[in-house]
Image: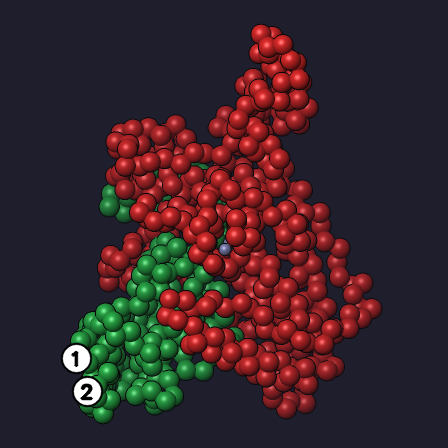
Chain colours: A red, B green
Amino acid sequence: MDADITDPSDWLSTPLSSLSTLDALLRCRICRDLYTAPMVTECAHSFCSLCIRKCIAATPASEHPCCPICRAAVTEVKLRRNQVVEEVVGWFRAGAREGLLSVAREGGKGRKRARVDDQDEKRSEAASSAAAEVRRSTRARPTAYVVSTSSSTSLLTITSSYQEIPPSPEPTTDGAYVNLDDDDDGLVPCPVCDKRMTVKQVTRHIDSCLSLKANTSSSSSTTPSSSTSTKPKTLLASSSTTPPHQKRLPKIQYSMLSEPKLRQKLQDLKIPSHGNKQALQARHSEWVSIWNANVDRSVPRAKTQLLRELAAWEESLDRFPAGSRVSAEGLEEWGVKHKGDFRELIAQARRNLPKRAEAKAEVEGEAELESDKAAE
Amino acid sequence: MESQNAHPAAGYSSLKMQDAPASAVDGHSVTKRLQSELMQLMMSNVPGISAFPVSDSNLCQWTGTIAGPEGTPYEGLTYKISMTFPANYPYRAPVIRFVSPMWHPNVDMSGNICLDILKEKWSAIYNVQTILLSLQSLLGEPNNASPLNAQAADQWDNNKAEYKKSLMAHYKDIEELADE
Ligand SMILES: [Zn+2]
Ligand SMILES: [Zn+2]
């Protein structure tokens, strides 16, 4: 299990409590985690690529996919990368968050008590106004929470300790560039001529390849300037945001496909192809979402990594009930399987709780408690 | 479903699962999302609602409580609900039921709830907290246009005293529900 669940509330007990707002703003409202490959919709809302793609994929065929926040219609092909947000999150996640948090916790020792009481008040205000907001709203919309806990907090004095923040690593350049193609020769095909070469070569090769192709195909044409129009459509569509060798997978109309044909599709993609049609369809749909979301990453991951993600998804199907079919036996089994995980979670939640409680208490030895925690 | 008989790792034999820490593949899982919600509920401590997984080990089955809103016939009463999360949560709504016997126009005698945000109006950004708050407000603002409990709807509209009487006749203290 992932023991590291971060939350915007992590900041509230520190003098940098207004960073709670920034922290919340950098999170996807669907998965509640910091954005991964954020995409902006036509209605200007942002979600992780995988989250919004899975959301669209989960929409019944009879309905039009809509934005989870404002219910405006969304179209998968119109999603665009939110580059700036991705870079900010990359910086935040790569160490800035942790660094700032530890500085904040350290710097907060002196005036902690006053600050936290202040925050507690704000927090309960925020909670009750959020509750009021929900109550006020019509039943159709429990107007989702905007996590803006401290809107007016006096701007934090970022002291000289700011320099202690460890420099954030470059946004994930370490994940060696990956071969997304099925073949494991480390090479990718040029999208134009299909010749195999390294990724670096492709970027250099592609321009010459395109103009070559343009020249040959426009030999019948009188205007050589028409070369742009001969660019392959797929390339034109994605060239602004995606490296050309990473092709998105098309969606499939599953109802039009027989089980053997669908199984063949999965085999062609080299993903597991066992199970009945329903299982095949669910797996294919999940794979398309995982694959296409990976294309949206500035540094995509290797196919083996994506397969692990698919395997983890498949495993979660066994742990959680399918749709409305909920069997008591299944739940029992699940419980036995994940006992350890859960203990860890509760322990983690408890570790976080005392921050509030102890700040409220009039404890002389507060500083010691804090330094104990810092030593953890 | 055939795949349930197979070992989860079936078909993934080429993967060395131990190579990847769970966190690396689990980033968007339903488990992680529910953990985050649990954390939020524990940290924010909104009065009048609570929710927690049923046992130390079961993250897809939660139990919750809702305090009746002030100024409604439910004031001072506390109701228990069950929440079951599907594998494709939050893309699909959890199944919510009143465990406490409930007298309400939009709740049937088995505890099934008719609430649009749990059905066709569900959104992936809704969460346990928004569900609990919506249910709480439903108690004071029933939708009598399409009631599951017609008698309750009629009483609500025409005879509040009778409504309160029926409500109390069905009510069970949460302590008495411990074994259910
Ligand atoms: Zn997300
Ligand atoms: Zn929107």
Q: Residue at x 48, y 47 (%)?
A: A50
- Secondary structure, mark 1, is helix
Residue placed at 36% from the left, 78% from the top?
B136
* Same chain check for tags 1 and 2: yes
Is residue B1 rendered to the left or right of residue A137?
A: left
Q: Residue furthest left?
A: B151
Left or right: A90 as drawn, with respect to B140: right
Compared to residue A222, the image places residue B159 above or below, namely below
Q: Earlier in the sequence, mark 1 or mark 2?
A: 1
Give coordinates of residue B58: x percent, y percent. 35, 65
| A195 relative to B57 in the view: left or right | right
Looking at the picture, which amino acid does disc 1 mark? Gln
Distance in Å between CA atoms under marks 1 and 2: 10 Å
From this viewpoint, which residue is outermost toward the front? A222
Subunit that carries the residue with mark 1: B
Vertical placement of residue A112 versus B24, above or below: below
**Residue A113 is drawn in which quadrant?**
bottom right
Q: Quadrant of the C terminus of chain A?
A: bottom right
Q: Secondary structure at mark 2?
A: helix
Residue B129's x, y, as percent? 43, 71
- The residue singled out by tag 1 in the image is B151
User: Which residue is tagged 2?
Assistant: B166
Q: Are marks 1 and 2 in contact (CB under 8 Å)?
A: yes
Q: Chain of mark 2?
A: B
Determine if residue A163 is in view.
Answer: yes
Residue A264: x and y in percent read 33, 28
Q: Tell me the residue at 68%/76% (across/down).
A: A153
Q: Residue at x 24, y 57 (%)?
A: A325
